[in-house]
Amino acid sequence: MKKCSWALSSPLEERYHDLEWGVPVHDDRLLFEFLILEGSQAGLSWVTILKKREEYKKAFDNFEAGTIARYDNDKINSLLANPGIVRNKLKINGAVINAAAFLDVQESFGSFDEYIWLFVDGRPLHNAWKTAGDIPVSTRLSELMSKDLKKRGFKFVGSTICYAFMQATGMVNDHTVDCFRYAEIKKACTS
């Protein structure tokens, strides 16, 4: 079976590609998880974050935004001492700030899902890239999302991070057209 070229770099990346990447996500907790993980990835490789994902879940209380929004200095200092995550004070503080902003969005829209999927009119966009080199790192939509998230107080949500978030959560199907997941995801979204 043909797969996106990046998925062949490691078994962990292949498993993520085959099971998660590009699958539409509508669960608020999982959307928040991806938002934090994508922000943590800034300047690093995605596989670095994948390797640390389980420790992130433990360290960040399974990405429960209500809990993270109440983190105090003691908790932040314990996170800074945790070798299982990216120990960057700006990114950790950003996660706490994002948790509060996430709760505000839930309050305003009923759910984060309702808000974030508005950027694609509630339906995944199915691109038709022939090679990994054709796939952009950001788009007009990710730029709009970035600006709106920043306006709402979110951190680590630049256009490139937003596009990676859109790819991860299935807002866009960026599997290459020859990848077996491209057709599977497209079919699942239209049935």
Image (cartoon, rainbow, N blue to C red):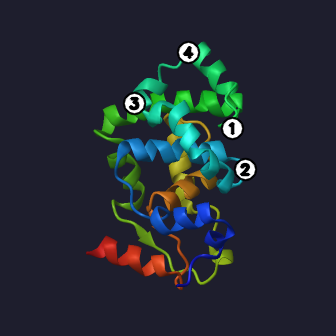
Position in image of residue 176 (x %, y %): 55, 79
The residue that label 4 is drawn on is 72
Q: Is residue 87 above or below residue 183?
A: above
Q: Callout 1: helix, strand or loop?
A: loop
Q: Position of residue 125 (x, y in %)?
A: 43, 69
Q: CA distance from mark 4 to mark 2?
A: 26 Å
- Asked whether the viewer can see residue 41, the reply is yes
Q: Nearer the viewer, residue 191 or 58?
A: 58
Identity of the amino acid at label 3? Asp
Q: Which residue is mark 1?
A: 86
Q: Report the residue marked by disc 2.
A: 44
- Give the CA distance from mark 1 to mark 3: 26 Å
Label 1 vs label 4: CA separation? 18 Å
The residues tagged by marks 3 and 4 sit, at their Cα atoms, a distance apart of 19 Å
Q: Which quadrant of the rendered structure holds the C terminus?
A: bottom left
Dividing the picture into quarters, in which one does residue 59 lie? top right
Callout 3 environment at 10 Å: few (<14), some (14 to 19), or many (20+)?
Answer: some
Residue at 64% x, 72% y: name it. Answer: 8
Badge 2 marks a residue whose secondary structure is loop
- Pick whichever of labels 4 and 2 is earlier in the sequence: 2
Q: Say which of marks 3 and 2 sits in front.
A: 2
Place of residue 35 in the rendered image (x, y in percent of width and height, measured from the top left): 52, 45
Q: Is residue 18 above or below residue 33?
A: below
Mark 1 or mark 4: which comes first in sequence?
Answer: 4
Q: Are marks 1 and 2 in contact (CB under 8 Å)?
A: yes
From where the camera sits, is residue 148 visible?
no
Q: Earlier in the sequence, mark 3 or mark 2?
A: 2
